Amino acid sequence: MADFRCTHCGATGLQTGFVMDSGQYSQGFANWVEGALERGVFGGAKLSGRPRWEIDAYRCPRCFHLELFAGRPA
Ligand SMILES: [Zn+2]
């Protein structure tokens, strides 16, 4: 559990988790990518040269709001 409060309702005891990505070629978790989304010719996101960060997602037990933090380089 994380020791901070939900920014939506103020509850404590947020549950640690992450945002899953079950796409065929994914590593199983989503990353945060710096810069606005741009799509390539096949519709996929252009990622070359973009910094990526792993996402920690904390779930509020009262209102189910997600607090997202991207603090580790992916
Ligand atoms: Zn909450």
Image: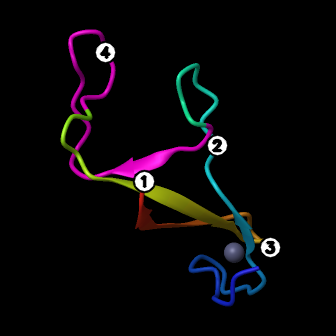
Measured Cα–Cα span from mark 3 to mark 1: 30 Å
x and y percentages locating residue 1 in the rendered image: 77, 79
> Label 4, label 1: how many angstroms apart (C-alpha)?
23 Å
Structural distance between the alpha carbons of marks 4 and 3: 37 Å
Residue bearing the label numbered 4: 43
Q: Pointer 3: what residue?
A: 62
Which numbered disc flags the more N-terminal residue, 4 or 1?
Answer: 4
Which comes sooner in the sequence, label 4 or label 3?
4
Which portion, as a residue range, is magenta? 28-46
Task: Give the residue number, with chain letter if any, for mark 2.
Answer: 20
Color encoding of the figure: rainbow
Measure the alpha-carbon separation of dots 3 and 2.
Answer: 22 Å
Q: Residue at x 64, y 43 (%)?
A: 20
Q: Which residue is mark 1?
A: 74
What is the three-letter code of the residue carrying label 3? Arg
Q: Is residue 50 left or right of residue 31?
A: left
Answer with left or right where residue 27 lies relative to residue 65: left
Q: Residue at x 58, y 24 (%)?
A: 23
